[in-house]
Amino acid sequence: MYKHDITGSTLINHWQRGVPVYREPVVTPTLLFFAALAALGLVLAAVRFFSPLGPFSGMNDAYAWGIWKTFNVMTLTALGSGPLAVGIAAWVFNRHKLHVVMRTALVSGFLFYATGLIALGFDVGRPWNFYSALLPWRWNAESAMLEISICMPLYCAVFLAFENLPLFLERFYYTGSERTRTFLRGIAPSLRRIYPFVIVGAYVLPLMHQSSLGGLLLLAGNKINPLWQTPSLPLLYLLAAGLCGLGFVIFLLLICSLRYSRPLDLGVLGELGNLLSCACLLFLAVRAGDLLWRGQVRAAFAFDKISVLFLIETALILIPAITLRMKTARETPRTMLKMATLACLGGMLYRFIPTSIAYIPAHRASYFPSLPEVLMAIGYIALGIVAFILAVKYFAVLPGEIKEWNYIFKAVPRRQPTSQSDAKGGTQWPASLSTR
Amino acid sequence: MLKDLTLDPLVASARVLDVLGTIDERLLRCGISRRAFVQFCSSLMIAAPFGLAITDKKTPEEVAAGLGKVIRPPVIWLAFQDCTGCTETLLRTSHPDLGDLIMNVISLEYHETLMAGSGLQAQQALDEAVKKYAGKYICVVEGSIPTRDKGVYMKLAGRPAMEVLADVGGRAAAIVAIGSCASWGGIPSADPDPTGAVGVVDLLPNQTIVNLPGCPPNPYTLLGVLLQFADSGTLPEMDGERRPKFAYDRDIHEHCPRRAHFDAGNFVKQFGDYGHREGWCLYEMGCKGPDTHAGCSTRHFNEIPDVWPIGIGAPCIGCTEKSIAFRVPMFKVVQIHTLAAPPSAYAPISAPQGVISPLATGLVGVAVGALAGAGYVASRRFSTMKDDESVPGSSMTRTPEKPDSSAGPKGPA
Amino acid sequence: MSSTTTPHQISRRQALLGIFGLGGTITGLAVNAVGSEHPEHPVAAPDAVSMLYDNTICTGCKACMPACNEANGLPPDTVLSGGIWDLPPDLNSKTKNIIKLYQEPDGPGFSYVKRQCMHCLDPACVTGCPFGSLKKADWGAVTWNSSLCIGCRYCEVACPFDVPKFQWDHWNPKIVKCEFCYDRLHNNQQPACTAVCPTGAVIFGKRTDLLAKAKDRVAAAPNKYFENRVYGEHEAGGTQVLYLSNVAFEKIGLPKLGTTSLGHYATKVTSVIYKWLSGPILAAGLLGVVIKKNWNRHEAESAEQEKKTGLQEQL
């Protein structure tokens, strides 16, 4: 009954379009837990607004960048590169199956970026001078920091936001009045005309800033262990972003399907797994080539503490790279989840290590994040989780079957005849998606 | 002499001062050796290394030659609520002939302790001196002036001190308030201040006043001021509290001989302990040196080196400062305000750290392990079978006996 | 408009973008081959000022420390001394200049060293500062501008000598580092530290002169100075503060650095790719071509799907 179109159309097995989660109450204990963490983080952020950085965080002159910059921004936005990786695969390399998971990637990507940028906003010491970002004559064009401080907010606030707009508009279409629908129908063609250009920007910008995140570390020079410090840092950071993005999308889809009891689609997942293993292999190839070229292979296998760290990070990426070459592995959900987790962890470690553990300042010092610092970092992540949970329940994000979509829109009106019905009898978004 | 007073005032005044004679003439008449005078001048130079015109950039012989020509300044010394300590300091020199010398350098017209006369004769001497040298004498005031109850607590010949000061001080060329009492009230003004003791400045703010606080101050400070005034009619540069800068611009701490001990952290903890016997810094015993402006650390008393409070092992009590002396407890430690000079401890080089922090690595490892573990646990809920798209709890169920006909159809190859 | 093209035809606009991007990249490559803003081995300006510190002359009196504090209006760092002395453990937000002591771990040998900003010829901090708050100003002094700094602390990460310090405890935090007594230089005065040094351990002059003088000292006393060379002549591309030492430079905390400027290393590749934004424009052009083509096909297919299932295609 459900067939793949050999030419690669958008008809796929179980994942045919985004479908909201409808069998769950919106407010669950999990949501409340993460909301509490997020609230705590935001309250602390408000306190930080009025407090100097020193007493509040554990940062010092030797380790001037704490976990907000190195983890919430540099590491988590790699996980948020799903839109980049999946998008390029879908729109540039014509992997049509992947269009159905674009929304998941976009929402998670947007949330990683947004929370990361919030973290960044509370991390800078003199934010009142940030208006210089709007004055191009003040820009120091050589600075990687400038590049990311302009590119990332622009990407998140304009391009990712625009790409997430259809989600909202779809909901307005189904829940709004006739006037809303007419208005939306009117602007739809213009939006569709702009969309491809937005897509182009949405790939060019992350190509720039994800590599610039690596470029930041070039200036640290000898302070970063030679196993990580290389002129290829920008390229490697970009490839790590790609593989983390893919890995996280797989991970997220599997976890969400598990949590919300939605069937899988191994065709799509298999495609993602294939891409993930290619990305991992590409990353490892560049890494290996770089180490060979710079004569660091002996150091990599010296089995001192730093070498062991390197080997762990490499193993975390190598295992998925090899395992997912096998078709059976790609079509087994358990293996997919394990491999995706390993790949994400490996990529995150790669991006995190040179900023912290392999970063050796010129004078002896130590850094450990303070409690408010950690709570804020966790709070931002929790904020993203809360927003994601709400998004999948209110909007059509997670991929599902068309019959689920039809079920939602046919079942509920029968049970709740008093819900707002459209006079013209079209499909409507149910007033409540709570448990039946 | 009375006849002379009817002449032109300028001439008259010159004639009057002629009577006093120059210092040289006086020294000659009294048989004081030139050598002693030169020695006196070198002591004066040590007391005022800079800031005093008469000693600036000269050798002791030059100073002696210059001073020799100075006409002895007439000095009227008023004593109010005093202990006579400031007079004693003037006399407290180790060479008796120098004490004598001082008496010959200035013309002390009236001094209750030192003058021969008393009673009516003393009063007459005062009145005459004031009339004779009106506008030319220097009025030295010792002791504070009581103001409470119309100043009845100190009377001179039946007149309250306030009145005497207004009278005698009013006709002086300059007033030198010697000692803390005359400068700002001193010990009589300490809590509960029953007499309402104040310094000269509080009563005659518009007069030319030089404050020489201290309990007592160094005698050479007084002499420097008096001699310069006698020589050129000018007073040395003064600070905001009318204290001559040459003697009061630095605090004790800046020039303390025990400063090296302060810098090295050698502090006396208890009177009589090892540090005390070794002459260590008295900061922790409450020495007020850092907050006290005076010259005691370089110009000791009685012309014997180390004869000054800190030198003998007693912490400075800040006797020149109105806000400290007799107000702040003697053993209370003060703040250091001036930019501290480099101490004897040095910052280490701190070699680059070559090892990774084990705590950080450990924690990252724990985090990674926890996430991997969580992923593993979650993964166990999934099927290990190939092509099984079912998920626990979903509408799709797995039919183990017919894996090929399960709900998840295979895609094309 | 692109809607009039068929999926396989490239529009004029896309072609132009692609050509421009490609052309820009090629030109960028060409231009960079000729001259660069970050030469691998920078050359000092002829009026570059300098300080020469010779640890064999320094007596560790530390007169330069309160002189620097006074000239820059900084308070003493009395934390470690309990309020009594200026005793900073290292350069920090109250200390722009410090004397440190190296002691031989097993032996009586020791050496003092004066640390402050090295005023590199091609400073990494200047390359990294996003809005140009740190810049190489007159006579090569590296100065900081409070109205441009956003407090990102990239300069702290970039500096190979770990010099810039951040005022962590202040609500209006500044970056604190030696600025060569910039105001005094403009008043024709020497920096405070060189002016007050009683032994001449640290002296002020033009870099050319002091480098020559340092080399003369080395030549006059062979094997007195470590490796018979001047530290800062080539380190990180060369610095304007020069060191002569009779103990190993690393022992006194002067890091071992290559001769390439960090700015050169960091911008080698990116300066080519981003010249006139040619790389991004090229990428945009290429992507634009491909994506527009795929988009058009996608639109066509989704129109078909909409007819079949009655559901609008989700973007």
Image (cartoon, coloured by chain):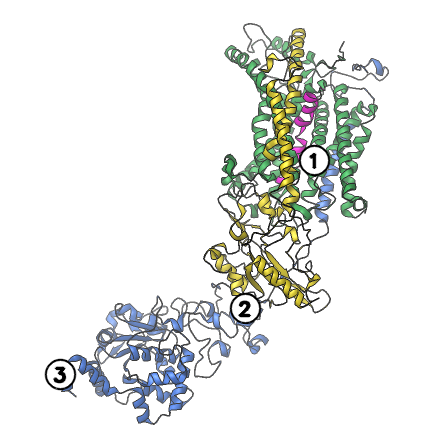
Which residue position holds label 2? C198
Q: Secondary structure at mark 2?
A: loop
Query: Label 2 is placed on what type of residue?
Result: Pro
Q: Is residue A223 left or right of residue B125?
A: right
The blue-coloured chain is labelled B
Q: Is residue C34 left or right of residue A4?
A: left
Q: Which residues are magenta?
A: A68-94
Q: Is residue A31 visible?
A: no
Of the 4 image quadrants, the one containing the C terminus of chain C is top right
Q: Secondary structure at mark 3?
A: helix
The green-coloured chain is labelled A
Q: Do tag 3 and tag 1 residues touch (Cβ < 8 Å)?
A: no
Query: Label 3 is placed on what type of residue?
Result: Thr
Label 1 and label 2: CA atoms lie apart by: 53 Å
Q: Position of residue B28 (x, y in %)?
A: 32, 92
Q: Is residue A205 left or right of residue B237?
A: right
Task: Please tell me whether residue A84 belongs to the stretch shown in magenta.
Answer: yes
The numbered dot on residue A235 is: 1
Q: Main secondary structure of the magenta part?
A: helix
Identify which residue, A177 or B378, lies in the foreground. A177
Task: Please tell me whether residue A332 belongs to the stretch shown in magenta.
Answer: no
The numbered dot on residue B6 is: 3
Identify which residue, B189 or A295, lies in the foreground. A295
